[in-house]
Amino acid sequence: MAFKKENRDKVHNPILDRLNDLNIWYEDMAAAGEGFPDIVTGRYPDKILFMEAKSDMRYSQISSPQLVFIANTPAFYVIVTTPDEAVEAVSNPEKYALTQKEKDRVAAWLETVGARLWEHKKGKEKRVQLLYFWTQIIKRKTVPGKYEVKKKKGV
């Protein structure tokens, strides 16, 4: 795996600091690129957790390589926006990680809507809004970051 220039969200280092303070094992993988999550952590060796750190659920984006990784990983995968969420996810990955059904929705979206969307973005970076990912692709009613999903009138 070739490492790229690091592009970290603002919350990345505070999450690492918190995990370190609590003596929770982690590997910082922010420079890995190619859709690989920012942090690998968990209760080694039995509960490995891939963690993507995002600063703001409303304005952050997720790339097509990240979506492909999510769709294909059998391991626990979480997207967190605060150090507290990161600690909760490590403590209880079964509760906070994407389910297999949600990962299957990502895979189906990539094969249908995503494929058409990427076709129109020739030469441009292929990303979707993270809030769209949560509410439209995997269809969660609540999202990390204590952000409430508000329904539009008439919908």
Image (cartoon, rainbow, N blue to C red):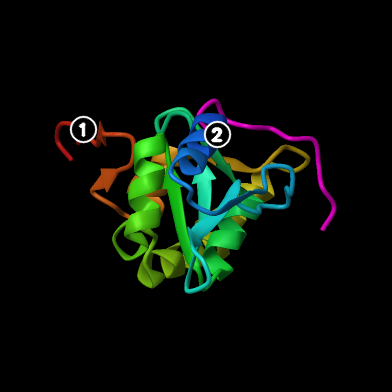
At a point 47% along the width and 74% down the height, the residue shown is 46
Q: Does the magenta portion include 25?
A: no
**Circle nearer the viewer, 2 or 1:** 2
At a point 32% along the width and 59% down the height, the residue shown is 92
At a point 78% along the width and 40% down the height, the residue shown is 123
Amino acid type, residue under disc 1 in the picture: Lys
Q: Is residue 122 left or right of residue 106?
A: right
Give coordinates of residue 154: x percent, y percent.
14, 36
Query: What separation in Å lies between label 2 and label 1 (alpha carbons)?
Result: 32 Å
Closer to the camera in the image, 65 or 46: 46
Report the residue marked by disc 2: 12
Q: Residue 16 is drawn in which quadrant?
A: top right
Report the residue marked by disc 1: 152
Neighbourhood count class around disc 1 (C-alpha, 10 Å): few under 14, some 14–19, many 20 upward: few
Does residue 91 lie above or below 83 as drawn?
A: below
Q: Residue 67 is drawn in which quadrant?
A: bottom right
Give coordinates of residue 65: x percent, y percent.
66, 53
Closer to the camera in the image, 146 or 107: 146
For the record, the magenta segment spans 1-11
Q: Quadrant of the N terminus?
A: bottom right
Closer to the camera in the image, 11 or 73: 11
Query: Which residue is farthest left?
Result: 154
